[in-house]
Amino acid sequence: MRVLFVLLNLLLLSLTLSNCRSTNSHLSDGASQRWVTYQTGKASWYGGRWHGRKTASGERFNQGSMTAAHKKLPFGTQVRVTNEKNGQTCVVRINDRGPHVRGRVIDLSAAAAKKIGAYSAGVVPVKLEVLQN
């Protein structure tokens, strides 16, 4: 009975670890992912007064998370954003609608803007790539 209990626990542990690896891999910027160019344009960022408010997806906006607003992409879509001025990239998850300013294609959270060097600039040219399953 004790051996069966140990084997069952080992099985559960291995399943948990394999789920953690697969869950985290889709959030990474790994070479095994298939990224498809979707759009180019200007990116801006938002934070401050929107922090803690509900997004269009219903979740609370967190300016410290790697999220973004896009007009058309489905919620939950993983997008690799490349700052075309410096080549820096980050991966964000779409959880809101916007931007609400003409000529911009994506609104990044403050954290995502910092990651690609767009925070102090405010608006930067970007390339958006969508993760394909």
Image (cartoon, rainbow, N blue to C red):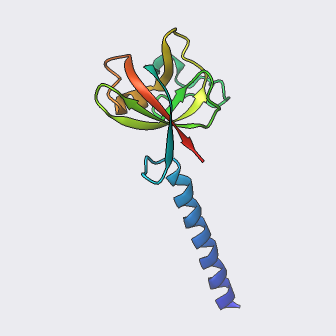
| Quarter of the image with the N terminus in it | bottom right
Residue found at x 66% / y 90%: 2
Q: In the rendering, at what x and y percent does residue 11 appear?
A: 63, 76
Up/down of 46 relative to 59, above or below? above
Q: In the rendering, at what x and y percent does residue 50 appear?
A: 53, 19
Q: How many marks?
A: 0
Q: Is residue 111 visible?
A: no
Up/down of 42 relative to 92, above or below? above
**Residue at the extreme left of the image, as rendered:** 86
Quadrant of res 76: top right
Residue found at x 57% / y 32%: 94
Q: In the rendering, at what x and y percent does residue 133 appear?
A: 60, 48
Up/down of 118 relative to 27, above or below? above
Q: Relative to residue 33, is residue 115 drawn left or right?
A: left
Q: Is residue 28 visible?
A: yes
Task: Compare residues 67 and 133 and report the one nearer the observer.
Answer: 133
**Residue at the extreme right of the image, as rendered:** 1
**Residue at the extreme front of the image, as rendered:** 37
Task: Compare residues 23 and 86 and report the one nearer the observer.
Answer: 86
Residue found at x 41% / y 37%: 90
Task: Compare residues 7 and 69 and report the one nearer the observer.
Answer: 69
Q: Relative to residue 113, is residue 49 drawn left or right?
A: right
Quadrant of res 97: top right
Residue found at x 47% / y 27%: 109
Q: In the rendering, at what x and y percent does residue 35 appear?
A: 49, 42
